[in-house]
Image (cartoon, rainbow, N blue to C red):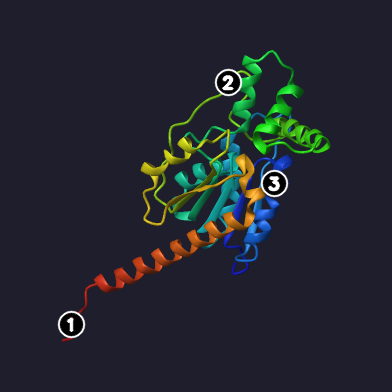
Amino acid sequence: MSQLPDALWINVSPPLQGFDRPLLKVLSQHTSIAQWEYAQTLDEPNSFETALVLLHDYLKHYNRPIHLLGHSTGGLLGLLYARQYPERVRSLTLLSVGVNPAVDWQAHYYTQRRLLPCDQQTILRQMVYGLLGSPPKDMTKVLTKLLEQDLYQSLSPHSLVRSPSLLPISVEIPLLVCGSVDDVVVDPHQLRSWQPHLHHPASRLWVCSSGRYFFHYFYPEQVSEQITQFWHTVLWSRHSSSHQMLVDAPVNAGT
């Protein structure tokens, strides 16, 4: 059990996992980190309950709490898990997860599909520009295809017929919320609205100066620095609490 990693990255969007690799590479220089991936076929319904059961089946073999991290809907799954099993989570880091945690890029896509007289490929190309800026033309085609695959393979609460919203989900564990100032999906207001829900003394909010929805891809060193500083704060607060418990413990006088 001593060989188990200290942190776990949750991925529920296999076609988009390439955007996570730069950050994971940098983080792996500071700690041992594993990846947990969930994918589904076209015949399977979107089921967060199934994903939660599978994630718990993986984590219940750990003999200590673990740092969880996730981008977008991967972060939402981590948030749902932390609410249900707080004793198993040392900390939770959310990237591009707003105070309404159900909002992801697919929510924006389906809203445009319902409102605009455009076909799928046109809207997906527009989504590429909104999520990533203005990539080269040949790269735009590749990214459009990735988004199309993500629609069919990733876990998301949204579809063409419904786009639900969720109330803020509060957890008592240390929470780091990260986003970007120019993200069109999770805007700064969605990020700032987390403030009343940061209950733990180690919890914090950080906003990157740019990078849009995939800011962790463009600025992996900056994001990694924020995460590792957060982990150090969590460790310090844990040790401080343990020390305070020892100080406050009653002393039995000898007879």
Residue 241's mark? none
Badge nearest the viewer, 1 or 3: 3
255 with respect to 243 (left or right): left
Residue 253's mark? 1
Where does label 2 land, which residue? 162
Q: Residues within 10 Å of mark 3 (few under 14, many from 20)?
A: some
Quadrant of the image occupied by residue 184: top right
Q: Amino acid at mark 3?
A: Phe
Q: CA distance from mark 3 to mark 2?
A: 27 Å
In the image, residue 14 lies at what x, y percent?
71, 42
Instruction: Provide the secondary structure element on which disc 2 rests.
Output: loop
Residue at 21% in and 77% down: 251
Instruction: Provide the secondary structure element on which disc 3 rests.
Output: helix
Where does label 3 land, which residue? 19
Q: CA distance from mark 1 to mark 2?
A: 67 Å
Q: Amino acid at mark 1?
A: Ala
Q: Which of these two is toward me, 95 or 189?
A: 189
Q: Which of these two is toward me, 181 or 199?
A: 181
In the image, residue 6 lies at what x, y percent?
57, 62
Residue at 33% in and 72% down: 243
Badge nearest the viewer, 3 or 2: 3
Q: Which of these two is toward me, 71 or 74?
A: 71
Q: Is residue 224 above or below residue 148?
A: below
Residue at 59% in and 49% down: 57
Q: Is residue 126 above or below residue 134?
A: above
Decide which of tag 1 and tag 3 comes sooner along the chain. Answer: 3
Q: Residues within 10 Å of mark 2 (few under 14, many from 20)?
A: few
- Quadrant in which the C terminus is drawn: bottom left
